[in-house]
């Protein structure tokens, strides 16, 4: 939303300068996007007098001029045909920027004659396309007068961002109202003169909808203007429109644009001589054609509101008028449209047609319903003033206007919802300045009537927001959280704690976080069982047709893209939900990561090494340990996930709870993504880690806290060749989970004198006494128990 400072002062009686205004706008929630101050931009350009003109000695078309400026006399070489002695022009000194030609002006010699500045044309100053001669200034001005003030460019242009709920501030008056409420002056009173018509319009407004469609256009009104003189707009109107980037066309069209921005009331006028019969609001026929003011043809759907006469379409309701009945300087009779439209319908139609306009921008955010009445009066006042002619009686067709919304507001809500105490009288004063009407005030409860131009106000929370933003968020005293004893230190819930902590821990290991869709293509996971997949009935895209059963496909998708950008190695992770159909709750929170490429690049002092399973294992144990999981009690098992290489992966389990999977990604999966590199990955099941977040002392004890000496015993067994070592270590741990702290395999040997179907496994068992140091008999008893277990359960024998 753009407006000029002087335009704002049309509605706001204030002495505040532009800096105070832009600061206040931001403070009350109207973010200032930019401020364009042409006066500062053109500060160096001033009126100068040509005191002498003579021919250039080496160029017939050039002249050498003596120029008197406010900073002294200068010599200027000029090629303009209209330069003459005694004239006043606009002087550009050296080191200035000529915006129209994008030239940085420097002292130079032109055909051997020094030129110290420039006499500029309108094109060079960017105010028109005129470049045949230099600007000639009326002699009522004096040397040194500002170029910006002479040409009305001393008016700052302010542009603000409007949030979707603040449709009232898509008008200069709405912005002025907010500033007045914030204490920057007084909102000027506005009156709409009700001009009576002296004849009946031969064009009537009609709404052709059934009862279920009436809401699409709740009402439309207008009137006929006869024998008007559609001329160029007065200078004040053209200046306002040009300042905000609109091109003046004719006074009729310019009035509609002016009222749109000035009061937030979109209008449209038709050349009445090009309309056959009455004008009707109705739904378009499927593929009905409409040629609009942007000189494009649109083929419409049957849910789009259109304006039509007995023969053709004359516009798309609330979005853009038709080309056929547009007004020109030859228009003698005009017909006015002041309508209301359903915001959602306007949005849908605009998006389908990919057609934007100032009218659509306002209608889809909601406008003042009462403007269907005062909009006619305001347009009539301006058209009669500048176009003359006769005016008909008003013709309209509309539903009964909705009654103004009323809210019961307890003044203590400012404290309970806003966290600050504001005097009740001050609250009432703010609301009244914003246009709210206080119907009664009993027992700290205000009965508030919401103004019709605020369709976004629905409840007490909205009223609190209005009072707070005008009162000033900067007036709310900050409170130190760290010193407030009433605030719980642990802000995160137990469920969120591992979620955020895991992110930090994985990032600490050098992984980069990604964020991807919770959907993916069925093609990426069609190797999974169908009962694991949750298919989407109405996907947003054909390649996002299932809920992701794993985060791996999204991570793998990025590898080739990274390699193409010469990132030949990397570590990436994502923490988020996965969705599996055969699970009880379908959704679980997972931390997934992958690494690929070289962990160590080849240099003169070290050999290149690729990432492998043990790098991933190191990372995952670090994370689990920091999350207080008892890693010394974790059981290693085979991982049965289709995403992992069967022989190079493992599952970490504690009791029945699976805490993590890790290993190489299955080559079959990599082939689906055309990945030639080896990729290792991990998955941490965060839902199964909640139990450890607040039980650190009971779930994890450091060896250092036990003063008794650890005991190590080494064993070597001859075992069947097909035995899985994970089964062996798990079985030994289960013998006595309290005393046996760790089982480590340090050697596996095959061949030599061993039978073909046998292998030798050497392992270390670490024992931890608790009450007293082990005796030799106790150690021997534990050792014999281990040997007996291996012999009975695994058909093994102690190697001599």
Image (spheres, rainbow, N blue to C red):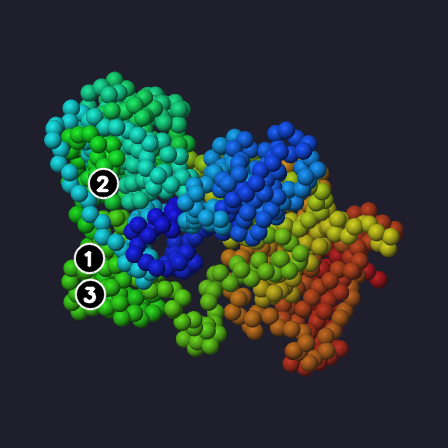
User: Where residue 138 sits in the image (x, y, percent)?
Assistant: 43, 41
Which residue position holds label 2? 378
Q: Is residue 547 left or right of residue 621?
A: left
Farthest residue to the top: give it.
Answer: 311
Which numbered disc flags the more N-terminal residue, 2 or 3?
2
Residue 184, given in percent of the width and then of the height, sits at 33, 60
Residue position for label 1: 437
Q: Residue at x 76, y 69 (%)?
A: 713
For the C terminus, the image quarter is bottom right
- The residue indicated by pointer 3 is 445
Q: Position of residue 563 (x, y in %)?
A: 69, 41
- Label 1 SS: strand
Is 246 in front, or is 49? 49
Horizontal arrangement in the rendering, residue 196 relative to residue 81 (left or right)? left
User: The residue tagged with tag 2: helix, strand or loop?
Assistant: helix
Identify which residue, 677 or 29, lies in the foreground: 29
Q: Is residue 398 visible?
A: yes
Q: Secondary structure at mark 3?
A: strand
């Amino acid at each position: 939303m753009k407006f000029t400072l002087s335009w704002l002062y049309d509605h706001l009686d204030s002495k505040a300068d532009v800096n105070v205004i832009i600061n206040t706008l931001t403070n009350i929630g109207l973010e200032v996007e930019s401020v364009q101050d042409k006066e500062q931009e053109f500060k160096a350009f001033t009126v100068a007098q040509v005191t002498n003109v003579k021919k250039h000695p080496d160029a017939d078309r050039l002249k050498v001029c003596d120029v008197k400026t406010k900073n002294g006399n200068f010599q200027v070489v000029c090629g303009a045909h209209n330069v003459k002695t005694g004239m006043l022009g606009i002087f550009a000194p050296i080191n200035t920027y000529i915006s129209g030609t994008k030239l940085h002006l420097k002292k130079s010699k032109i055909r051997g004659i020094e030129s110290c500045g420039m006499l500029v044309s309108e094109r060079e100053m960017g105010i028109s396309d005129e470049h045949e001669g230099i600007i000639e200034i009326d002699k009522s001005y004096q040397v040194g007068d500002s170029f910006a003030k002479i040409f009305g460019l001393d008016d700052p242009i302010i542009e603000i961002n409007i949030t979707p709920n603040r449709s009232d501030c898509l008008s200069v008056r709405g912005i002025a109202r907010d500033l007045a409420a914030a204490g920057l002056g007084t909102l000027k009173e506005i009156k709409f003169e009700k001009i009576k018509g002296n004849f009946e319009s031969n064009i009537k407004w009609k709404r052709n909808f059934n009862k279920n469609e009436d809401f699409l256009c709740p009402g439309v009104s207008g009137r006929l203007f006869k024998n008007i003189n559609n001329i160029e707009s007065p200078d004040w109107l053209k200046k306002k429109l040009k300042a905000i980037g609109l091109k003046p066309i004719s006074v009729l069209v310019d009035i509609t644009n002016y009222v749109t921005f000035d009061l937030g009331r979109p209008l449209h006028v038709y050349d009445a001589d090009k309309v056959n019969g009455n004008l009707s609001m109705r739904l378009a026929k499927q593929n009905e054609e409409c040629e609009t003011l942007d000189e494009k043809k649109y083929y419409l759907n049957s849910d789009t509101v259109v304006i039509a006469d007995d023969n053709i379409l004359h516009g798309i309701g609330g979005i853009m008028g038709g080309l056929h009945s547009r007004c020109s300087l030859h228009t003698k009779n005009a017909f006015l449209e002041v309508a209301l439209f359903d915001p959602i319908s306007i949005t849908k139609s605009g998006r389908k047609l990919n057609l934007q306009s100032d009218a659509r921008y306002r209608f889809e955010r909601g406008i003042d319903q009462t403007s269907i009445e005062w909009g006619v009066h305001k347009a009539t006042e301006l058209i009669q003033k500048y176009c003359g002619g006769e005016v008909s009686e008003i013709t309209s067709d509309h539903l009964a206007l909705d009654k103004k919304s009323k809210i019961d507001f307890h003044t203590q809500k400012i404290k309970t919802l806003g966290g600050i105490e504001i005097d009740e009288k001050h609250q009432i004063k703010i609301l009244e300045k914003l246009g709210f009407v206080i119907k009664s005030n009993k027992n700290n409860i205000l009965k508030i009537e919401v103004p019709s131009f605020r369709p976004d106000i629905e409840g007490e929370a909205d009223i609190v927001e209005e009072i707070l933003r005008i009162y000033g968020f900067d007036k709310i005293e900050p409170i130190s959280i760290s010193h407030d004893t009433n605030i719980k230190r642990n802000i995160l819930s137990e469920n969120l704690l591992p979620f955020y902590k895991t992110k930090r821990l994985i990032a600490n290991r050098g992984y980069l976080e990604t964020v991807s869709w919770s959907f993916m293509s069925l093609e990426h996971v069609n190797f999974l069982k169908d009962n694991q997949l949750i298919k989407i009935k109405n996907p947003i895209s054909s390649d996002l047709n299932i809920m992701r059963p794993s985060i791996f496909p999204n991570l793998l998708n990025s590898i080739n893209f990274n390699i193409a950008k010469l990132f030949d190695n990397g570590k990436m992770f994502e923490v988020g939900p996965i969705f599996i159909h055969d699970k009880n709750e379908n959704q679980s929170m997972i931390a997934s990561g992958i690494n690929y490429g070289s962990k160590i690049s080849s240099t003169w002092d070290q050999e290149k090494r690729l990432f492998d399973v043990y790098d991933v294992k190191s990372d995952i144990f670090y994370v689990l340990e920091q999350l207080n999981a008892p890693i010394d009690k974790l059981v290693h098992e085979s991982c049965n996930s289709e995403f992992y290489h069967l022989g190079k992966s493992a599952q970490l389990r504690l009791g029945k709870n699976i805490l993590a999977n890790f290993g190489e990604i299955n080559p079959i999966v990599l082939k689906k993504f055309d990945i030639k590199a080896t990729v290792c990955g991990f998955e941490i099941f965060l839902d199964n880690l909640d139990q450890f977040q607040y039980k650190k002392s009971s779930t994890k004890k450091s060896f250092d806290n036990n003063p008794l000496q650890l005991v190590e015993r080494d064993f070597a067994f001859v075992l069947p060749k097909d035995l899985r070592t994970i089964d062996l270590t798990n079985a030994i741990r289960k013998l006595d989970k309290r005393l046996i702290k760790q089982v480590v395999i340090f050697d596996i040997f095959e061949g030599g004198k061993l039978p073909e179907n046998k292998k030798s496994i050497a392992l270390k068992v670490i024992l931890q006494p608790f009450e007293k140091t082990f005796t030799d008999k106790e150690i021997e008893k534990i050792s014999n128990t281990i040997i007996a277990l291996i012999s009975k359960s695994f058909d093994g024998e102690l190697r001599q």
